[in-house]
Image (tube, coloured by chain):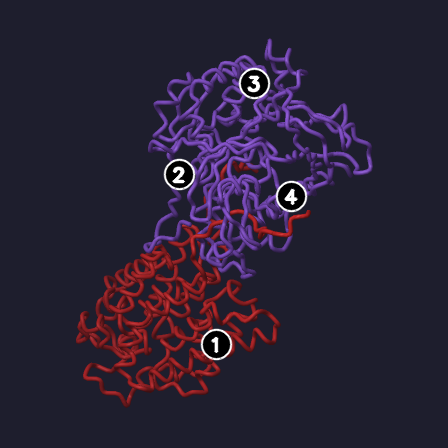
Chain colours: A purple, B red
Amino acid sequence: MTRKPFLGLGRPRLGCLVLATEGQEAIQEIPLPNRVTFFLEHHHDSDEEFDLKVGDEVRTGQKLKLMQDDKGYAISSVTGTIAGISQYKGYLGKTYTAIAINTAEEEHWDEESKEAWEKPNAESALEFLDFLPGDPDFASLLDSERSLDTIIIKGIDSDLLVTTNQLIVKTEFENLKAGIEYLKEITGAGKFLIAVPPELTSQAETTGAEVKVIEPTYPNTLPKVITERVLGRVVPAGKRCEEVGAGFISAEAVVSLAKAITHHQVPVNKIVTVIDKNHKSVHVMARIGTPVEDILGVLGIETQHGDGLVLGGPMTGRAIYSEDTPVMPDTDAIMVQDRSQVVMNSNSHCFNCGECVRDCPAKIPINMLVRVLENGLYEEAVKEYDLLSCIECGLCSYVCPARIPVFHYIMLGKYEFDRIERMEESNA
Amino acid sequence: MPNQKLFVGTHAPFWHDGSSISTRSYHTMLAALPAVVLGIYHYGVSALGVLAFSMSCAMIWEFMMNLVTRRPASIGDGNAAVIGLLFGMLLPATTPWWAVLVGSFVAIIVGKHIFGGLGCNPLNPALVSIAIMTLSWKSFLDFNATLVDYDLGFNMIYPLAAVKGFGASAVANYSMPGLLIGQQSGGIGATFGLGLTIGGLYLILRGFIRWEISLSFLVGVFMTALVFNIADPEKYANPLFHLLTGYTLIGAFFLITEDSSSPVNFIAMLVYGAGAGVLTVLVRNIGAFADGVVFAILMMNIANPLLDKIRPKAMGKEIEHA
């Protein structure tokens, strides 16, 4: 954990881990798990009949849809039988349907997607590539309403200690080059940039995309900061980077795209950075859907009741309460925290020291914002105190001496404001 | 879920830089120590008594208020002790015990807890109490009267009272180095300019107080005093004198920087500090009181919420033109 330095006059300097030295490319392969789980974002009533049933057989690479006309789907990473379908509530009240599959010994590949690879286009990308490792957001990249002029490939991971995409740039630059060519065909965007730390410039140059070096210091690695620094475009408050013409895709997703098209098979393995209790990180390759427990077991990382377990990095990850939670297409990292290191928040008032205001990259008056958020005044928070300008870096909570869960308040505020807006729309 | 091993579900971020309210409080007290030690050296055990009693009363008032309002005990954060210490440092060593008791009550209850406790006080609690004492029991804060029995081997006439009553010539024999090392009468912990400055620099470098506020306050005092001095050197003391006497330095590094009652944005901090500096000298030179720091800072505390509206534009915010 990075502590406040003795001389505390300036801003905190949170350097991101950079894969500079040799020998960090080792990837440990996780054996095929007995059971995998996929989460599908869910818009149905729980008593509806799904097309998938317990006991159904699935093949590797098969598309799993709850209903015929659903847009969201999962791609099975194993061959086996469906063992259970259950409801799951995730971050910010999102409901998911969890599909558990018991793996069979013999692996069979699904053939349905075969012909889609002959001539990859926008349609087939949406149809078969939304569940790729690295979680490409083709729905935004291909949205016809706002055409993107620039696509930025993230060769540097947003969060501290996470090096998944750096590893991809370092080891798979040939696939990256091929993936960029396919991506050009599919999206038709004119400009391709690749954002990398200074150490990976030479590898990035071989990919054919324009190289943009990002200083590996948090929060320079966040998409909105990159959009501002690299393109000189400020994303308006409450809007996404796509609305100023910049789309983001992770390096891993680009490589997965290349592999899918060249091998005519959807890749099912995800690279994950696993950060242990001593902040040492290793890379593993696991099937999507592998429970976290299996990965920690292979690596010999022991956990106990009351420890912290996070999907993602230390600044922006999501805590999970059970080791049964699976690796998802966007799970770039798994972080284990000893119970003694878990940061507990307090119920202190803000005492207006101003640390958060000085460190906020979006220049939000957080000292005032947190006061209105504590009192549930979400509309005032948006109008007066720039709630929607937040780029979700988490530095405010990180530096708060009163240990107020500021970031939590902000995310809750955004969620509640969104709900209020939608309610007003439906009543109008 | 079959797995009974559960993990702690907190929200991101999962790291913290380790700072805390209690660290800030304890380091503030540490930084005040040089000035406190010299005060105790000068005035002996009675000064120690005032400080100890003030701090313990403040903590007890805090705890009692926690009980009454049924909130978790908050003495552990050290804020009450800091308020008690600063209040004691501003008092003369001869202050009777009951005045300390009442004063600390005013500081903690009226100055802080009525508004909701830590972080909710619009004014500096220690200064609220000193202001009320100045208005209610004027004689207790008249340093010439209260310290009349002390002879410490240097001029014991309170410098600000002397310049107010008799003009600049009355204070011509105070040497600046003497003032800096505490050879003047005044509050227990308010006279040792060098110690206060060292403590203040420590707090600034550690990031516990903001240099913008302290510096602009001192510049405000200096510039205003300079203008007065140039206008009438006979009547008004030189600016350096104003920097080294009264509550100026304890004000600059320990009082005006109090978090909850001071702004956080850069320009706001500069205006806030400079405004208090100007008001300080105005009160001293043409106002009713010998020292103006107390009322100047309180006045700027009131202006703080308004000043903090001077802030940078948030990222991606569209300005609507009327």
Callouts 4 and 3 close, C-beta under 8 Å: no
At a point 49% along the width and 59% down the height, the residue shown is A402
Residue indicated by mark 2: A17
Residue A215: % across, % down: 37, 34
Residue indicated by mark 3: A260
At a point 72% along the width and 32% down the height, the residue shown is A82
Q: What element carries label 4?
A: helix
* Residue A207: assigned label: none
Mark 4: which amino acid?
A: Leu
Comparing labels 1 and 4, the label whose residue is closer to the camera: 4
Asked if residue B313 shows in the view, the reply is: no
Q: Residue furthest bottom?
A: B149
Q: Distance between the residues labelled 4 and 3?
A: 32 Å
Q: How far apart are marks 2 and 1 (CA)?
A: 45 Å
**Going by the image, does A205 lie left or right of A271?**
left
Q: What element carries label 2?
A: loop
Residue A98: % across, % down: 69, 37
Comparing labels 4 and 3, the label whose residue is closer to the camera: 3
Comparing labels 3 and 1, the label whose residue is closer to the camera: 3
Q: Residues within 10 Å of mark 1 (few under 14, many from 20)?
A: many
Callouts 2 and 4 close, C-beta under 8 Å: no
Residue A65: % across, % down: 72, 27
